Amino acid sequence: MLRKQADVSLVLIGFLVLAACAPTQAPQTGTGPEAGAPPQVFKTLKIAIQTEPITWDSVITGGSGSPTSGGQNNLAPIAQDAMRRTLTGGEVVDLLAAEVPDGAKGTWVVKPDGGMDMTWKLRSNVRWHDGTPLTSADVAFAVRLRTDPDSSRLAGGSGAERLLTGVTVLDDYTLVAHWSGVNVTVNDGTGLTPVAKHILDPVYQTSRQAVADSRYFTTEFVGTGPFKLVRWEPGSHIEFLRFDDYYRGPAKLNQVFLRFVPDPNTMVANIMSETVDVVLPQGVDVELAFELRERWQREGSGNQVLMETRDGIAQWEVMLNPTYARPVNGMTQQPVRQALLQAVDRPELVNVMTYGLSQIAYTIYHPDDENYPAVKDVVPPLNRQYEYPYDVRRAEQLLAQSGWTKGPDGVLVHQPSGERFNYQVLTRTGSDRFKESSIIQDYWKVIGVNLEIHVLTPAEAADNEYIATRSGASFNTAAGANFYGLRGHSSTIPRPETRWTGNNRGHFSSPVVDSLIEKIAVTIIQQERVALHRQLVAAITEPIPYHFWYYEIRPILMLKGVTGPRLVNQVSSGNIWAWDKN
């Protein structure tokens, strides 16, 4: 059933040839130690990601496409700090925040009108990279930009942030964030990452569009993070130097290059030739990384491959809106969606795609999800009701009951309407993405589905309307927690009035699910939240709005001596101030 796998060892031999021809050093344009200074090690780290970022802030600039694909979200932590950040093991580190909102202290208040006020205090020793002190006014200005009704990317399509209405500045280091509704997840600083008012306010006085078009959000960015931007060479790399006035103390590295390497094969060739020191997700697939790890272990090179598990689910988001879905009587019907799920041998898919390192994603709740202990007895494997096991005969029965039978050429035909089951999945570049789709294509061919695999061009991947009005499924790797964090709410369905922004790109709509998500967002008492999550399991699993395949494994490749990179919430650079190279 599965396609014959390529001999990865032969592929690596090809990489050795490429590595021999690859450049041995990244561009070195930053300043080094001053002449006459005591000898010291000037540490340069070269990082490879797959996709060149579009902007430093997609909400303010209206940047389209996924800001997380291809490792783009590793850009911001290098030069821009947020209020808080979650690191490995669930540790939450306060960055710009000196004090966070606390209901017991009266700094997190739910108002009679259903909104809430959250009081934050900033550190007093934070400076922008041009030396200007950070103040509350910078946070208030950033929120003003993100909530501006003329924004190219409306806050209504960006989850909890849509509830943020404004900021009141109490003093240089104290501010109150105002929310139109209650959401218990926004104590992470959602929506409050500052921008440099002293630079952008004069631009804003000209026009809101002038801000979106400003080079501040690309080649002239000024941030508060551990490294400062030196040069952005479009299509090639971004260069950073250590910011010695960083409020946490200088980083261990002196210089960082973030290189854009679209082809995973070239990524491997580059690290094998030591042209780069680190390859971050997404890019190199598990199969190749697994073989590379074994090779390096045999050679005793000391080079490292981390197989990072994450709560992201390899999934196909099915188009449910009959206005766009084709065939009309196909995936818009729950029995059909169940049939196609049961037509795939998911245990074998997990073995092939992750070398048995992961497990089937039966529901939105990953075993590492903080809510998993409360729901594990109502989800597989303890509760087999939502297991939907591999069963071709059952799949064919469900299809027949829905009016689908095979025609003379083996393709399903809907008897009442005459529609043929020609279906399309949109996927992104990467051999693992195509491999997964090809495996599913073979399984579905057995039951009569003619699946076309369409690899998105860069222009298509950046086109929100194209993705939101597709006819079939779209591959994504969103975390399950994103679902009950509003991804599954009908308010986040992309629409013309939100300029096609919004994360619910399959147009899933359920009043029951909407109500549960809304209650989860505002329920502070843990016991009550547990009851809501248990109800959500059934409400979201039975309709099968997504085809969940497995929890993702993301490889990080590192040369010997590199320490620090870990994958947390799809970001590997969150603790880059602590990275080192020995």
Image: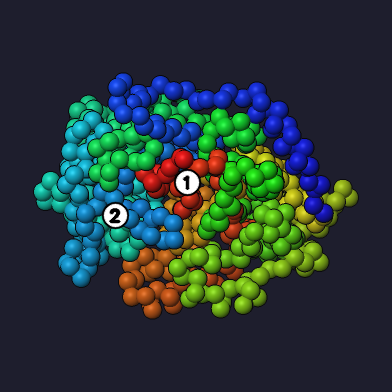
In the image, what residue occupies the spot 32% across and 71% down?
A: 524
Disc 2 element: strand
Using a 10 Å C-alpha cutoff, classify the residue at mark 2 as few (fewer than 14 neighbours), some (14 to 19) or many (20 or more).
Answer: some
Q: Where is residue 413 in the image (x, y as percent from the top left)?
A: 79, 53
Is 32 rendered above or below residue 163? above
Is 553 rendered above or below residue 266? below
Residue 214 in view here: no
In the image, what residue occupies the spot 38% across and 69% down?
A: 519
Most foreground residue, 4 or 511: 4
Per the image, the residue denoted by label 1 is: 563
Q: Position of residue 226 (x, y in %)?
A: 33, 40
Q: Where is residue 364 in the image (x, y as percent from the top left)?
A: 54, 63
Q: Amino acid under label 1?
A: Thr
Per the image, the residue denoted by label 2 is: 94
Image quarter where the N terminus lies is bottom right
Is 195 displayed left or right of 495 in the figure? left
